[in-house]
Amino acid sequence: MSMFALPISVFELKRDNEMRAALRAGWRRSDLVWERLSEGGNRLLEKKHAKAARMRFGLASAVAWLMFTKGDLRRAASHANLAAAATMLGQPDKAKRYYHAALAIWAGAPSAIQAMEIAPRARSSLFHLRMETRHWDTYCDNMRIRMSKFASETDACLQARMAEQQAPHKLFARWKGEKPSVFDDTRKVLAACLLIAL
């Protein structure tokens, strides 16, 4: 059978449990595709494969611009990732333009965090489930505070890189431990904060 027998848009959803779960939760396919492309680009850049990383980041950026709204923080993350690849490829002027574009979008982070729709988490006990249900507003407020701290750290990193300084925080390294299992807006915002190459 020819390797060109199936169009590139065909996915084997039977084997992709994560994609099925995301779609059931109301995500679009593009949400998880962007996340996966950005993860892959970050891993490649960690290994100093700048050209391959730039290709992944370029695809993620195309997804962001075609599928996400104008103020979506993942657009800012895409710009920042293209800037990191440009820096590694010795293109500082291009990197600065990308960081400038990222920061322009990132200015909307507080509004994006306030607008997040937060889904309930799976809890290990009935007690924790009842507590979350009983104090849902407090839980959501605390989640927004937590996301605001991540966004603030990301902003500091973007500002530092724009000034060609060392980033004060690790971002992508933290994604591996912080990545939520729930497919809601908090995961999108956290991905925008942490799926950034520095």
Image: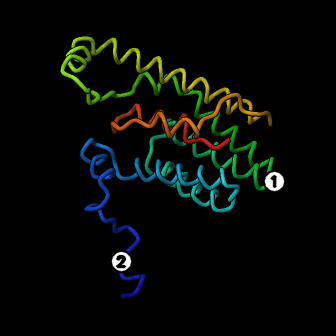
Q: Position of residue 37 (x, y in %)?
A: 51, 54
Residue 29 relative to residue 72: left or right? left
Residue 186 position (above or below residue 127): below
Residue 69 relative to residue 150: left or right? left
Q: Position of residue 43 (x, y in %)?
A: 59, 52
At a point 54% along the width and 54% down the height, the residue shown is 40
At a point 34% along the width and 28% down the height, the residue shown is 117
Which type of secondary structure does the marked residue at label 1 adopt? loop
Q: Position of residue 111 (x, y in %)?
A: 48, 23
Callout 1: few (<14), some (14-19), or many (20+) C-alpha neighbours within 10 Å? few
Q: Label 1 belongs to which residue?
A: 90
The N terminus: image quadrant: bottom left
**Image quarter of residue 142:** top left
Residue 177 relative to residue 184: left or right? right
**Amino acid type shown at disc 2:** Leu
The C terminus: image quadrant: top right
- Of residues 32 and 178, the one nearer the viewer is 178
Mark number, residue 6: 2
- Of residues 100 and 13, the one nearer the viewer is 13
